[in-house]
Amino acid sequence: MKNMIYKISWVGVFGLLVIPAAMGGNPILKEGEPDIKAPATQAELNGSIEKAGDAACEERMQWWREAKYGMFIHWGLYAEPARGEWVMIDEKWPVADYAALAKDFNPTEFDAAEWIRVAKEAGMKYIVITAKHHDGFAMYESEISPYNIVDATPYKKDPLKALSEECKKAGIKFGIYYSQAFDWYHPGGRVPRGGAWDPAQKGNFASYFRDISIPQVKELIERYDPAVIWFDMPSGMTDDYCGEMMTMVRGLNPDMIVNSRLKFSGPKTSVLNEKELGLLRELGVDYLTYRDREIPEEAIWRDWETCMTLNHSWGFTADDHKWKDAKTIILMLTRVVNMDGNFLLNFGPTAEGVLPAEAVNSVREAGAWLSVNGESIYGARASSLKKVKTFPAVKQGKRLVKPEPDVAWLATERPASKQQPAKIYLNIFKWPGSQLEIEGVSDEVTKAYLLSDPERKPLKFSQNGNSISVDLPQVAPDPIASVVCLELVTR
Ligand code: GLC
């Protein structure tokens, strides 16, 4: 860890390897592991991925890179039929029938302080909530369209206002999701899958974009001062439309973080070429939102995020009970940090305004783990020790694949700073018994300890070249994952 500027190299089918630039070689591989080629030249090291944004982008991204873990919330009228946020199009509801849901939408149980308390206890550092999803209904008081929670429901209150205030109090960053092109209520909004099914949806997209999309994003920024604007489903978003949106956004708030779904989404996200990545930079986009519910095997941009469901749905779905447990959450989060990304984990609250209890239990348990082991996550980065070959994607519906259950351990790192030495964190998911053997530690280890030990008593270890052997307690201290921290001096 002589020079802690990380460079990322492509390693073909074997996924991503992150190498401290000055290490100049491969970590030693154990038998049976693929031979990952080290990058040959500095030019190779300076690939597109490491191309950071401009100085303003670097500045904006500071808190986001530190945060690593956020709460996503899909909440809207669709919570009432409770069959997910695509119910309107899936079942081709006539616009007037769907809009009539508003008359009964009365989330009297909604408690913004409670939601933010859950985020805090979960260890989440930011939230992103649907201000307007594809159904076109605004979950805030909009002057642009009366089709909103204050003007069209008996509830008459503005949950985004309440949440943004609670976030401020709690020191949690407030982010807004906005469907900038899909809109199945306002005429002219894009409608996928064969287009409009109700004459009420017919109209001109240019007018829709000018009269609804741009002005609603503008009022959201002016009113709620979000730290992130999270666009989604860029159907027909030409470079001009994207440029217009970004000019307005940056004009109002130069510090706001903007995701890549302004322009690209879906499968495309994993195969963006240099030119497309360049276009995103030119537009002023800050980070790449990866494909839904997938942890990539390769990262293609310096800053990226994956969004994940806690069960299999985004919007509340009454018969979806397949909840992820705390261990799965921590495994996924560690894996994402292990590849330098951020993890946005979704809740689909009920029409009454309640976060599903099973989801809350899982994230609270994961939060308790983070309160002990969070040092290995927040502000941590990818590690040169990462030896995961591939990590099966976690996909939707029929394509769902479970995360790799056999990961023995994953490493993250932190460079040396004025306050502390360089560190490697070994997040161990499968406890090896009384001894852990690791290869590829090129720097001198000065101390090893468990993050769960409040006294941080040194564990016995021996180092021989790049190999290190650490004595451990026979039984794992933590059933989710136990973290061994190695402190280092550079050789
Ligand atoms: C997809 C879906 C949408 C959901 C989003 C979350 O884009 O269309 O319903 O909000 O994924 O990332």
Image (tube, rainbow, N blue to C red):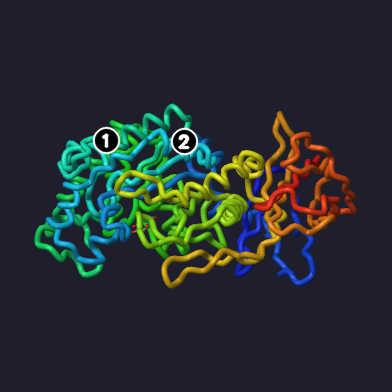
The amino acid beneath tag 1 is: Asp
Residue 30 horizontal/vertical position (percent): 79, 66
Quadrant for the N terminus in the image: top right
Measure the C-alpha gap from mark 2 to mark 1.
19 Å
Question: Quarter of the image containing the C terminus?
Answer: top right
Residue at image position (77%, 64%) is 29
Above or below, comparing residue 253 to residue 137 in the picture: above
Q: Amino acid at mark 2?
A: Arg
Q: Nearer the viewer, mark 2 or mark 1?
A: 2
Q: Position of residue 390 (x, y in %)?
A: 61, 66
Relative vertical location of residue 89 with respect to residue 62 in this rendering, above or below: below
Of callouts 2 and 1, the N-terminal one: 2
Q: 213 or 121: nearer the eye?
A: 121
Q: Residue furthest top?
A: 169
> Dot 2, how many residues are within 10 Å of its Cα: few (below 14), some (14-19), or many (20+)?
some
Q: Quadrant of ligand 1?
A: bottom left
- Given residues 286 and 155, the one toward you in this image is 155
Check disc 2 and report its element: helix, strand or loop: helix
- Is 362 situated left or right of 389 in this image? left
Q: Secondary structure at mark 1?
A: loop
User: Residue 166, percent across and down?
Assistant: 40, 31
* Identity of the residue furthest to the left in this view: 199
Residue in the image at 33% along x and 40% along y: 109
Residue 117 disc label = 2
Residue 436 in sight:
yes
Count of numbered tags: 2
User: Residue at 33% across / 46% down in the picture?
Assistant: 130
| Residue 291 visible within the image | no
Q: Which dot marks residue 54?
A: none
Residue at mark 1? 158
Relative to 161, 39 lies left or right: right
